[in-house]
Amino acid sequence: MKSNVSLNLFSEIEKLKKEKNAIILAHYYQEPDIQDAADFIGDSLGLSQQAAKTKADIIVFAGVHFMAETAKILSPQKKVLLPDLKAGCSLADSCPADKFSDFKKQHPDHLVITYVNCSAEIKALSDIICTSTNAQKIVETLPIEQKIIFAPDKNLGKYIEKQTGRKMVLWDGSCMVHEIFSLKKIIQLKELHPKAKFIAHPECETAVLELADYIGSTTGLLNFTKKDPSKEFIVATESGIIYQMQKASPDKTFIPAPPNTSCACNDCTHMKLNTLEKLYTCLRDEKPEIVMDSSLILKAEKPIRKMLEISERLGL
């Protein structure tokens, strides 16, 4: 049950969207109110595809900074807003551009594939961008003799190596949300819920993934829970996705996998900086705005477009 304040904000946001020809794109990890206010909810690939094709004049990106940057890169003529500029990403922060540039120089004959969870500066140093939805497929399109640098997520990189049999040079980065799941607590949960399917995002550590009944992107996890006949699921990714899982399958039970803390679920503090109130004021005032250098946009756009072309060709 939503409060009167929330209901008023929803109606005001709707009014502003029409007045300004604006669209709200929200990641699955946003709080439920923001997901309900969004025109499109998705993971990084789906959101990139929407940002590239929208006819809106203003894009409000309810996510984290690198996502809003990606929208600006794909639609540089549009105004791109982020409700809270402090909404960063631990994985993106783990790969500074100057250090990665030096790392790349150490492997001059390698093609660079970078996970979309990185800064525009890292994208500009890359050959192809990927998401957890398409990373394995993109690697599989390359000749077997092609040497590859994969950055910034070492856990996703290890997972792709295992799935493809390819050896890649991995940058040593990780996501704080997916790295702090407690293996011990997950095993205990599985014992308490023996009929539950354990599903996990490939950013999780290898030991956690080895327990999983299904591994997939955020959208992949959601789709799996819709189609699988099981009635219980233990979910190892940011807990925001559980809202959509519950909406899609109200007859099923979703249990967030616990982290190595006293909390029962695992939230991304960066994602949760955005609120419905901030979304409203952001759209009303048309700030904070993502502003980028045009030369950086041009360099970063090429590997993103390459990803979108490959994804379209593969039907992803």
Image: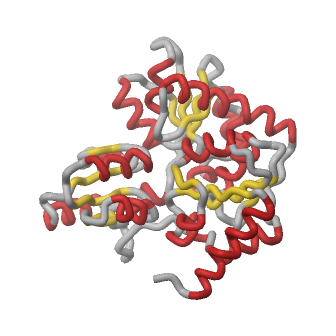
- Residue occupying the far bottom of the picture: 4
Above/below status of 270 relative to 165? below
The answer to whether 155 appears left or right of 91 in the picture is left
Q: Quadrant of the N terminus?
A: bottom left
Q: Nearer the viewer, residue 75 or 153?
A: 75
Horizontal side of 226 relative to 128 (left or right) equals left
Compared to residue 19, the image places residue 9 above or below, namely below
Q: Is residue 14 left or right of residue 209?
A: right
Query: How many tags in the picture?
Result: 0
- Toward which corner of the image does residue 246 lie, by quadrant? bottom left
Q: Where does the image place residue 40, in percent across and percent down from the top left?
A: 57, 54
- Across and down, in percent, residue 119 comes to 68, 46
Residue at 61% x, 86% y is 5
> Residue at point 19% right, 65% down?
188
In the displayed structure, would residue 302 be above or below residue 231?
above
Q: Residue at x 55, y 56 (%)?
A: 27
Q: Is residue 34 left or right of residue 215?
A: right
Residue 71 position within the rendered picture, expressed as x and y whole percent measured from the top left: 70, 47
Closer-to-camera residue (216/92): 216
Give residue 289's quadrant in the image.
Answer: bottom right
Q: Position of residue 154 (x, y in %)?
A: 47, 41
Residue occupying image coordinates x 46% and y 64%: 240
Residue 85 in view (yes/no)? no
Residue 46 visible in the displayed image: yes
Task: Give the answer, above or below, for where 50 lies relative to 8.
Answer: above
Please say which color scheme the image uses. secondary structure
